[in-house]
Image: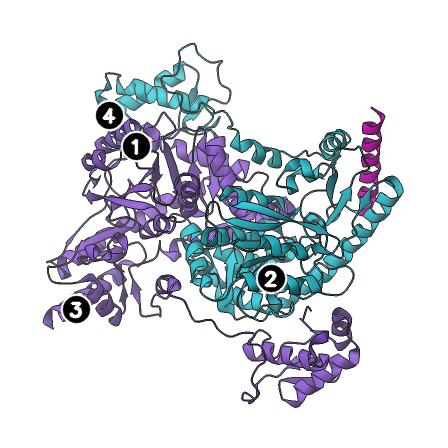
Chain colours: A purple, B cyan
């Protein structure tokens, strides 16, 4: 143990020790019932006499904070006495008040829960995560690779074999790149964060869809970007408005497939037009393909990256949406000079993503489970999308909503007069969670007539029940 | 599959398809022997007729790139024909030349390997990683928590239970803080990266030890910090020189225990003086305690954080050095207003560290294995430190070197006239790897008379053999 003692302070050492332990016990840093170090060991550690330590422990025992038992040493008492009057000399564990900046994070984290809740939020359905198969894969990796899988990755850009595997998945999406162009990241969020680190300085203009993915907005804001929004319609970003705002901007952030939050898919014609404009104005494009494989209807549209022959498009994908968000593994495809700078940024940021998870994912995906899981998940979520559509038509006939060709999200335009922020409260009162449209706009008020529903999380019966409750919440607001 | 086709281009669709597949096969994006999609499925996906696809596949078969077998579909040929004369219309996989910025990363990643190598580099000894126990823990977590462990963490700051566990480890180091002050990071490298994001702007002055941890130097340089170095002696940073450089700086980065690379431990008196100066000049301190628990001799020195009653010290620890680097889990202790900004930075950077690994680590550490592993590892590495000392005294009597009280590193001052960069080459020629002193200085030339040896990686016999070889390399350089 390392306990700060001040020999010259005038306070006896045993008293300093006693106070330190008392504070640690009262703050919970030393849990109830936990064992204290041996007096001999602690005295040696701290370079004090054993008498000093036994005296301190005796004082603690006297005040009821610890109990000593012959043969089993000294332990923190199972129940603490009520707080003594003596003021703590140093507030070891004074809980700092939650500052304002954390409020948003806490709101995000402090979503409602409980068994009765029907949440149209989250990522996919945990019941669809391949838990058993992935557990088996982890075991195999540890058995075959042992300590090597628990070491640093051989390159900060990622495990070479997983990078190769990603190129094979990319090939099936029309993107042909060598493994050197693939950087393994801690989710696609980190892919965007690394690109910001390399390309965006405070005050730089970044063009985004509006509405767009809320945590991209927050990230871009946090790096000091000046955000310019381009509206989204049923065919994605209205690219014809890009020509005005693109010149001079440092980055174009776009989610072409099953956009978050609207569900819209950028048409093939617009993709080509977007890339032409990016070429003309020499602006790099960040293509966030967070759920590109999860398609339920219509025909596949080429990734913007697949049309790019100049290394202008940075393409990010993730295993979070389709497999398991808890892995936090995604990838970034980058070509040309920026690639080295991104790898350098990855290395100085966190040295590289967990090798154990990379090895397990590589093994998991290689053996064809990715495709099987995709087929199974696609079937499951397509049905849920259709059940949600049916439920909205039945219970909320006044609302307009999108029917996305894939992904996770339906975007609902509320009946006139219904505010999303009020609906969120009324819905939560009725055990339904959803995302209010505010968080997807630079100016939150612009989103007040929209909500986003994730249809992938709940089984069909819960979807219908949830929309029935949501309709009751809308009625309640109208009736006031 | 999503393959970009241009119906209006004048090139027949079957030809576009054929070229796309040919490029993907030649680039390796579609591996040898891999299965192509069915003609029916691909035609539906792309919205083209099935004849288009079968014609394209027939062309590919004709050029020897694929083989078709009745009943098992079409596959990429196991061996490719030599490259056809026809130029590729689009270089799908033209390998971009490695840009200059990646050179350093590649040098770092491209360390020598092979069975005969004796590397005094790396982290700890992989043979000491608790592979079996950790594998068992992972299994238990997946069995008991299932899909929940593969979801996002409930809070971007980390799993609540692991945050509590970390406060218990911290308590044994004299640091009493509540779980709310603990932020789980992807290694302690990310802890520093997040602090930089929040506190350091380009042009800001950051004070560091000199020499210091190379990847902290690179990170701070990459965010545009103006670095000021304070020399290190046997008792750590020469704090008396701090008073001159601290005023006006934005951060003080310090590794007080078993410093990387010198192995020096900052004396208790200097710790107090350092904190006093930081208070006086209102500068936050980043205390990087990367190996604080790994002590082999002497008495424990209080962490600077344990002396801090004003929330001025940001304290980072990691499980990488003691347990397994491949986990990439560390933690940052922060109090007061900055805490919320750091959690926000963590969230927008990567949403949070892998929950599966957090849950497994929490379970692993809770059951007392951390302490048992610490005792075992301490015994192992202490012996190796002493073997290295003996070997250096015997084989390199002209060199001066440190005998650290803990950690992983011995810092060797080479005999006069021996340059570290030349010695690195000569040592690698003899199958020995080490870290040249250059990388630990702002100006690499300042490190040319030093090398850093990690004594924890090799078993005793290899250490002696490695130093014998190193002495031969020194002799070789002298004999020129």
Q: Chain of mark 1?
A: A
A388 relative position to B355: left or right: left
Classify residue A386 as left or right of residue B388. left
**Distance from the alpha carbon under mark 1 to that under mark 2:** 59 Å
| Mark 4 and mark 1: Cα distance apart in space | 17 Å
Callout 3–callout 2 Cβ contact below 8 Å: no
- Residue at image coords 54%, 89%: A82
Residue A388, quarter of picture:
bottom left
Chain of the residue displaying label 2: B
- Residue under label 2: B277
Q: Report in which chain the residue with disc 4 lies.
A: B
Specify the quadrant of the image occupied by residue A9: bottom right
> Height in image: A335 above or below A44?
above
In the rendered image, residue B342, in percent from the top left (x then y), is placed at: 46, 58
Give the number of the disc on residue B49.
Answer: 4
Task: Evaluate whether label 1 is on the same chain as label 3.
Answer: yes
Q: Is residue B48 magenta?
A: no
**Is the residue at mark 1 from the same chain as the one at mark 2?**
no
Would you call the spot at circle 3 few (<14 residues within 10 Å), some (14-19), or many (20 or more)? Answer: some
Q: How many marks?
A: 4
B307 is higher (above) or lower (below) than A165: below
Alpha carbons under labels 1 and 3: distance apart: 41 Å
Cβ–Cβ below 8 Å for labels 4 and 1? no
Helix, strand or loop status at disc 4: loop
Hey, which residue is sitting farthest front in the picture? B244
Q: Which disc is residue A302 wearing?
A: 1
For the magenta stretch, what is the residue range? B460-480
Q: Chain of mark 3?
A: A
């Amino acid at each position: 143990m390392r306990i700060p003692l001040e020999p010259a302070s005038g306070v006896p050492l045993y008293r300093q020790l006693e106070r330190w332990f008392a504070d640690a016990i009262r703050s919970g840093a030393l849990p109830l019932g936990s064992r204290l170090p041996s007096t001999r060991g602690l005295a040696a550690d701290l370079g004090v006499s054993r008498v000093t330590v036994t005296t301190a422990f005796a004082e603690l025992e006297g005040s009821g904070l610890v109990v000593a038992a012959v043969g089993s040493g000294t332990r923190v008492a199972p129940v603490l006495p009520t707080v003594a009057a003596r003021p703590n000399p140093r507030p070891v564990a004074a809980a700092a008040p939650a500052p304002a900046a954390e409020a948003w994070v806490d709101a995000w984290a402090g979503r409602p829960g409980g068994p009765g809740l029907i949440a149209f939020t989250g990522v996919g359905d945990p019941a669809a995560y391949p838990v058993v198969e992935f557990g088996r894969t982890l075991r195999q990796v540890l058995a075959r690779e042992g300590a090597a899988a628990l070491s640093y990755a051989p390159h900060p850009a990622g495990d070479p074999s997983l990078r190769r595997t990603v190129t094979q998945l990319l090939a099936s999406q029309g993107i042909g790149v060598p493994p050197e162009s693939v950087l393994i990241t801690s989710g696609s969020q980190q892919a965007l964060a690394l690109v910001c680190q390399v390309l965006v300085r405070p005050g730089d203009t970044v063009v985004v869809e509006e509405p767009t993915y809320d945590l991209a907005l927050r990230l871009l804001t946090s790096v000091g970007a000046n955000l310019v929004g381009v509206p989204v319609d049923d065919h994605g970003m209205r690219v014809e408005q890009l020509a005005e705002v693109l010149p001079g901007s440092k980055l174009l952030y776009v989610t072409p497939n099953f956009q978050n939050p609207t569900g819209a898919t950028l048409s093939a014609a617009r993709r080509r037009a977007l890339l032409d404009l990016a070429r003309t104005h020499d602006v790099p494009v960040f293509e966030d393909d967070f759920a590109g494989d999860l398609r339920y209807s219509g025909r596949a549209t080429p990734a913007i990256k697949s049309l790019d022959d100049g290394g202008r498009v940075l393409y990010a994908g993730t295993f979070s949406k389709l497999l398991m968000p808890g892995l936090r593994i995604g990838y970034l495809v980058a070509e040309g000079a920026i690639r080295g700078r991104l790898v350098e940024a990855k290395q100085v940021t966190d040295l590289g993503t967990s090798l154990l998870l990379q090895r397990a994912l590589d093994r998991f995906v290689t053996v064809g489970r990715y495709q099987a899981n995709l087929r199974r998940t696609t079937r499951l979520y397509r049905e849920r999308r259709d059940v949600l559509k049916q439920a909205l038509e039945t219970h909320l006939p006044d609302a307009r909503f999108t029917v996305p060709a894939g992904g996770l999200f339906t975007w609902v335009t509320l009946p006139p007069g219904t505010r999303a922020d009020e609906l969120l409260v009324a819905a939560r009162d009725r055990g339904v969670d959803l995302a209010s449209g505010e968080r997807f706009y630079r100016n939150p008020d612009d989103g007040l007539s929209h909500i986003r529903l994730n249809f992938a999380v709940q089984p069909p019966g819960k979807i219908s029940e949830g929309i029935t409750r949501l309709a009751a919440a809308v009625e309640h607001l109208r009736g006031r």
